[in-house]
Amino acid sequence: MPNQELKTTYTTAEVADRAGVHKDTLLRWLRAGVVAEPGRDRHGWRLFDEAQLADVVRYASASTTPILTSSFSSQSSALGDEIKRLQGIDWDFTGAKTDYLTHGLHPYPAKYIPQIPNALIQELSVTGETVGDIFCGSGTTLVEALTLKRHAVGVDANPLACLISRVKTSLLSEDALGSLLELASHADSLAASITASAERGLFGAAAFASKGSRPPLEEIGFWFEAHVIEEVAEAKLLAAGLTDEAARDAAFVCLSSIIVNVSKQDSDTRYVRRDKNIGPGDTLRRYARTLKDAVRRLAEFADMREPRFASNVLCASVLDAPNVPTLDLVVCSPPYPNAFSYHLYHRTRMLWLDMDQPTFKREEIGSHRKYSSKGKNAATVYTFSAEMQSIFRWLKSALRPYRFACFVVGDSTVGGQRINNADLISKAAEAHGFRRVADLERTMQANKKAFNPAIGRIKTETIVILQNGTGSAN
């Protein structure tokens, strides 16, 4: 018999199989620190050696891992245990790490922390079911659903949100991840060349000029230094040159993630101008760092996600009753009326990525711009109530009968009046046969959500759990 080369390293899946546990169980142990983290290959994939494999097997032999066996019936009384367990959770999650996996891939104002959908998904659904987020934003719920072995469906009218959500939930091949690392290396080299050239500028060296496309100068000149425009245009050109679609989308998301940082816009939540001293080469250097970080995060997410669980992101207004797969659970955070304007704070990103920002501006629900208008068509609390009514009319058939829709929401101020959005949403739901099962209260960490401070600053929010009555969903 010919000699066979002895195997000396093992993937996460292989170690989990040897230990007799699910892959996601092993990854939870790694994140909790109960077993030691192994080394990684050049693409960020975990590789265990023999000793680390043996440690995991020993820990698994001494552990008892609970298996989710809950099922749901049409009788609301059968759901009491799940609701009681949810009521016993400390929903503040003070000090919890919130940017793990792909959650930290792209900044996104006012997103909720991943621990919220994670807990709701574990209690109110079972493996193999479909979890929907009808205001998916940057995809927090979708990422958690996939890591918990559920199918994920997201809907959002914001094309940038949909791009971010698709990338955060994608399974990139090793070749695709490699192409992103090559792009990072090229951006690093170009950045070094631009910096060196700028330092020789007194001796007649020409400033770097990209052949890449860019928005009209009258749209972006106020917000970007001239040399930053050239480097962003070059990063966009490099990203567009990738042949793998998933890698190309990831490269564009990485570019989008740095746009505000390299611009003169103060921050995602402050639409004022300030100088940030971005020097020649800094933009491409920052882009390279972001690409490398994205590869690590996408590789870690691939470790957690099984390909058999699908993710579907629809770029559509939920007011248009989009056609979605039948949902077993909805977990979302709807836009609060008058609290935020995503079309405004994402404007420069959408301009650079050639997205239709004016259409999204018209479709955005709850935007501060609509509610602060003084004209006869200004939005009011009745506008928001009517929109919620329309959404629940659609959700009635999109969500299976007797299943749950969880809305994470806080108060907002409209026309000088404080609005209890939890009550408003519940009334709209009850008009279409939903039942308000529970309210879970939480205090928000000051740095985890930000709105317009004058009209949207909130310190607490409510997780409203609504149960669908009989409906037409199969």
Image (spheres, grey):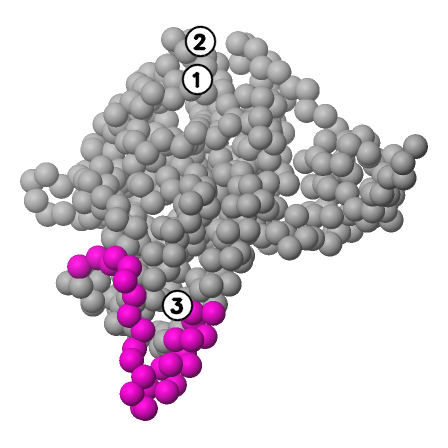
Q: Residues within 10 Å of mark 1 (few under 14, many from 20)?
A: some
> What is the quadrant of the C terminus in the image?
top left
Callout 2 touching callout 1 (CB < 8 Å)? yes
Which residue occupies 72% across, 41% down?
A: 12
Amino acid type, callout 1: Thr
Is residue 417 part of the magenta span, yes or no? Answer: no
Task: Report the span colored magenta.
Answer: 189-216
Label 2 sits on a secondary structure element that is: loop
Whether label 3 touches label 2, CB < 8 Å:
no
Q: Position of residue 98 (x, y in %)?
A: 55, 50
Tell me which numbered mark, 3 or 2, is placed earlier along the sequence.
3
- Measure how far apart labels 1 and 3 are at the Cα level: 44 Å
| Quarter of the view holding residue 422 | top left
Mark 3 nearby-residue class (10 Å; few <14, some 14–19, many ≥20): many
Quadrant in the rendering for residue 315: top left
Three-letter code, disc 3:
Thr
**Mark 1 and 3 residues: CB-CB less than 8 Å, in contact?**
no
- Left or right side of 50 for 227: left
Question: Residue sitting at 72 percent across and 36 percent down?
Answer: 13
Disc 1 target residue: 326
Q: Which residue is mark 2?
A: 474
Looking at the image, tell me whether mark 2 or mark 1 is earlier in sequence order: 1
